[in-house]
Image: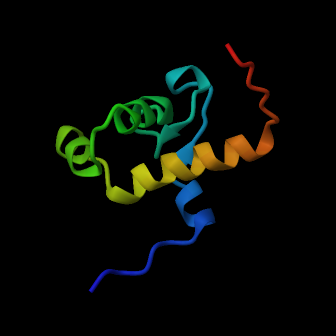
Amino acid sequence: MNAAAPPTNSLLSRITIDPEVCHGKPVIRGLRYPVESMLEYLSSGDTFEEVLAEFPDLERDDLRACIEFANQSLKLRSWQLVAA
């Protein structure tokens, strides 16, 4: 049986922003793993399991937090796509 997913605000608490860590970029739990980098791994096709095997000090909810952070960030901005 799977445990219930943590609430969104609980996930977002895993993302930290500190000007002294990675030049103020959002990172996972202050561990110097930028959210941007984790999203790049996932968007290139790596699975959660592959990323977690590569970075054993991360947890599944850390990756879920990255996705939720990106989701919330997009809600804050208005994007305009230009057709090529």
The residue at the far front in this view is 84
Q: Dividing the picture into quarters, in which one does residue 32 lie?
A: top left
- Would residue 59 be found to the left or right of residue 32 on screen? left
Identify the residue shown where x is 47% and y is 40%: 30
Residue 41 lies, in percent from the top left, at 35, 33
Identify the residue shown where x is 53% and y is 60%: 11
Residue 2 lies, in percent from the top left, at 31, 81
The residue at the far top in this view is 84
Q: Quadrant of the C terminus?
A: top right
Front residue of 80/19: it is 80
What colouring method underlies this structural image?
rainbow
Residue 15 lies, in percent from the top left, at 54, 46
How many numbered marks does the figure carry?
A: 0
Q: Quadrant of the N terminus?
A: bottom left
Residue 28 lies, in percent from the top left, at 46, 43
- Would residue 50 be found to the left or right of residue 23 on screen? left
Q: Dividing the picture into quarters, in which one does residue 39 lie?
A: top left
Identify the residue shown where x is 52% and y is 27%: 21
The residue at the far bottom in this view is 1
Identify the residue shown where x is 49% and y is 72%: 6
Q: Is residue 20 above or below residue 56?
A: above
The residue at the far left in this view is 53
